[in-house]
Every structure is written in C-alpha cells, then in structure tokens.
Amino acid sequence: MTPSRRQLLAGTGLTLAAVSLSACGTIMYPERKGQIDGKIDTTVAILDGIGLLLFLVPGVIAFAVDFSNGTIYLPGTGRRAEATRVKEVAYTGALTKARLDSVWTETYGYDAPFALSGLQRRPVESPAVLHAELARHAGQQVFAG
C-alpha cells in the first residue's frame, strides 16, 4: 500500500470516528444537558442533519445523543424550565382548593399539577429561606407557587 493511500484511509477513518463520537449539541452546549423537552434548536438540528446526510450511522448517533442528553432543545422553552422558577404570590384569606387553583393558573398559565391534600405547608421567613429549602429538596418532586 502506498503512503498516500494509507494517509487517505487513516484520514477517512479518523474523520468517521470523530463524527460518530460527537453530537453537535453536546459539544457546543454542554450546559443544556438534562433538559427534558422544549423547542428544538435549529442550529443543532441542521448540524446533526448534515452528519446524517454525509454519514448515515454517525448522523443517527448524533441525533440520538443530542436527544438523550437534551442538548438539542433551546433553554427555557420546556416545561421543566418553567417549573423551576419560583414566583411569590401574596394573598389573604383561607387557602382553599378553588383559591389555590385560580392563583396557580393566573401565575403559571396552566392547571396546578398537584392536589391540595398532598401539600405540606410551612411558614417561611423570607424568599431566600424558601429558595434554600427548595434547593435542599432538589431531585424530589417539589412544587411552589
């Protein structure tokens, strides 16, 4: 085998390996890992699509990696991003199911994802204490409104 042919094969193999082991969203936006859903980032989708057109298997792998990592989604467009923002709502009177549902819908724009009977209510001194308490329960199913 001639040296030029060997270099061509080595270069092609290296290119194929690099493309198959990479996913554009995961490389360009590692901070997006863990997103569940949202609007798809067209830049990442186009780059993954180019990989799909040029090399079928690496392109499929790139899409699969980006979807499984959540890096193909634009930040702040999924339901998870909305649910992590805590908003303060001041109201007076008794906490009834009807009042809680109306306040939640007005504040977040969708129906409350919990039942009133399943809530644990605790007084907090300040928003900072509330945020610290929510951070302490990170990973658990915690909703506040």
Image (cartoon, grey):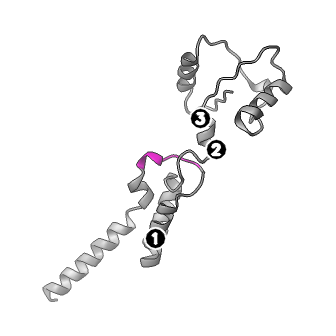
Q: Was residue 120 drawn as part of the magenta stretch in this picture?
A: no
Residue 34 percent coordinates (x, y): 51, 46
Q: Secondary structure at mark 1?
A: helix
- Determine the CA span between mark 1 and mark 3: 32 Å
| x 16%, y 85%: residue | 4
Q: Was residue 32 drawn as part of the magenta stretch in this picture?
A: yes
Is 21 left, or right, of 140 in this rendering?
left
Q: Secondary structure at mark 3?
A: helix
Bounds of the magenta segment: 30-36
Earlier along the polypeptide chain: callout 2 or callout 3?
A: 2
Image depth: mark 2 or mark 1 in front: 2
- Determine the CA span between mark 2 and mark 3: 9 Å
Relative to 109, say whether 142 is above or below: above
Residue where numbered disc 1 is placed: 59
| x 47%, y 62%: residue | 43
Is 87 left, or right, of 119 in this rendering?
left
Residue 131 percent coordinates (x, y): 55, 22
Query: Residues at badges 2 and 3 in contact (C-beta under 8 Å)?
Result: no
Residue 64 percent coordinates (x, y): 51, 62
Image quadrant where one finds the C terminus:
top right
Query: Residues at badges 2 and 1 in contact (C-beta under 8 Å)?
Result: no
Image quadrant where one finds the N terminus:
bottom left
Single out the residue that lies furthest toward the right.
98
Q: Secondary structure at mark 2?
A: helix
Is 108 left, or right, of 66 in this rendering?
right
| x 78%, y 14%: residue | 92
Residue where numbered disc 2 is placed: 79
Residue where numbered disc 3 is placed: 84
